[in-house]
Image (cartoon, rainbow, N blue to C red):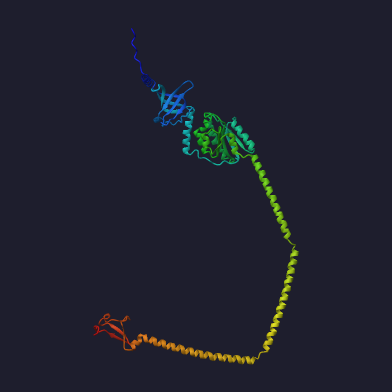
Amino acid sequence: MNAPTPTALSVSQLNQRAKQTLERDVGEVWVEGELSNVSRPASGHVYFTLKDDRAQIRCALFRQRARFVSAPMRDGDQVKLRGRVSLFEPRGDYQLIAEAVQAAGLGELLAAFERLKAQLEGEGVFANARPLPFPPRKLLILSSATGAAIRDVLAVLEARWPLADVTLIPVPVQGAEAAPAMISALGLLNRQAKLDPERDVVLITRGGGSLEDLWAFNNEHLARAIFHSRLPVMSAVGHEVDITLADFAADMRAPTPSAAAERLVPDHNTLKRQLEHQHSRLQRAMQARLERDSQRLDTLRAKLRHPGEQLNRQRQHLTALNQRLNRAMQQALTQQKAQVTQLSRRLASQDMARLHRAESERVSQLQRRLGSAMQRQLESRQARLKAAARELNAVSPLAVLGRGYAIAQDEQGQVIRRAEDTQPGQKLKLKLGEGRLSVEVKRRLKSGG
């Protein structure tokens, strides 16, 4: 007798049961691991693998949750992930549905660094950019007395600027006590600077290391102490790729301790070469100037004459002028004498009585002509005056009055032209051809009356 055939599950049923069991029994968990195979398709979801050194699990971070995750989520990042264990039924893939992602380990330090950086930047702690004295009169260095950084700095200073006045303030540069020690030393240096104004630059430096090794230089209080320092501060922490909050708060950052020393002091060899070059230029310029002045002096010397020679020339010129003046005066005197002699002869030849009679006759003739002209002019003017008088008399109102007419005026002197302009009893003045009359209006007659 054959045994009954057991009821078989379909693949989808099996995957469904497995999914329900995982979600019910495991539920939501926190898992820490390393990200790998991070993928961001156009859908906005994020797919990745979370692994450690012995196992891995596929994960999905859906779009609705991905927008709340601030961690950068790059391959190799160490993260802590909160999610639900589930199963993707179509493929039977065991997976973790992520709800939240946080940086872990180094990632947590970087996240804390970014948060503190943003806070301090918003408060203006990174605003310092004061110029550093070049070279400094007294350089104050905060660093480890036994580290490679101080050896590099001192070696570069000795090679570039042996005159550098350096004071080392030994402080721990790693560990929990490093930041408080540097803050205390920085405050002490600022107080002492009031007593010693020569102290003018502070260098904070150490060699390279991991993020944890350099974490003391990301201390919030150290950054604030650097910002409030009266003395300008240069920061040179780690290698070129290492950036700390102390670098941002300082007035100037150098990528390495050696680079800091190079920026703080000039290279005396370079200055010596520059000085020698300038000295050579100055000598060449002086030599050229001397040659030009020497040539100019020779030219002036060739033009220069002895004062005696100049006096002789002036004396000769004066003698020549004197001779010319004498000759001119003698010539003018001779001409004047000849002219006087000629005029005397002409005067002696004239008959003065005959000249007087001629001139007298001429004057008499002119007087007669003047009298005739004046008489004719007077008669002409009188004729014109009589004609004008006749014309004036013809149009004169007085001539009209002489023919029996009169001019009537009121007491104000206004001429009366119409009878309507008068009133009975009104006093009027009549101007006649000869004399005036004062009359009174008795009554007004109509026109033609």
- Quarter of the image for the N terminus: give it: top left
Q: Is residue 112 above or below residue 268?
A: above
- Taking the image as shown, residue 265 lies to the left or right of residue 2, namely right
Viewer-proximal residue, 319 or 144? 319
Please state the horizontal and vertical placement of residue 414, each as a whole percent of the image: 32, 80
Q: Could you tell me which residue is drawn at 74 percent across and 67 percent down? A: 313
For the view shown, which residue lies furthest in the front direction? 1
Please state the horizontal and vertical placement of residue 365, each as a whole percent of the image: 56, 91
Please state the horizontal and vertical placement of residue 435, each as a whole percent of the image: 33, 88
Viewer-proximal residue, 314 or 37? 37
Q: Could you tell me which residue is drawn at 46 percent across and 88 percent down? A: 380
Viewer-proximal residue, 407 or 56? 56
- Quarter of the image for the C terminus: give it: bottom left
The image quarter in which residue 18 lies: top left
Q: Is residue 103 visible?
A: no
Q: Is residue 43 above or below residue 365?
A: above
Please state the horizontal and vertical placement of residue 358, each as a whole percent of the image: 61, 91
All told, the count of numbered labels is 0
- Taking the image as shown, residue 366 lies to the left or right of residue 57, namely right
Q: Could you tell me which residue is drawn at 74 percent across and 66 percent down? A: 311
- Taking the image as shown, residue 361 lies to the left or right of residue 445, namely right
For the view shown, which residue lies furthest in the top direction? 1
Viewer-proximal residue, 177 or 97? 97
Q: Is residue 39 above or below residue 54?
A: below
Q: Is residue 359 visible?
A: yes
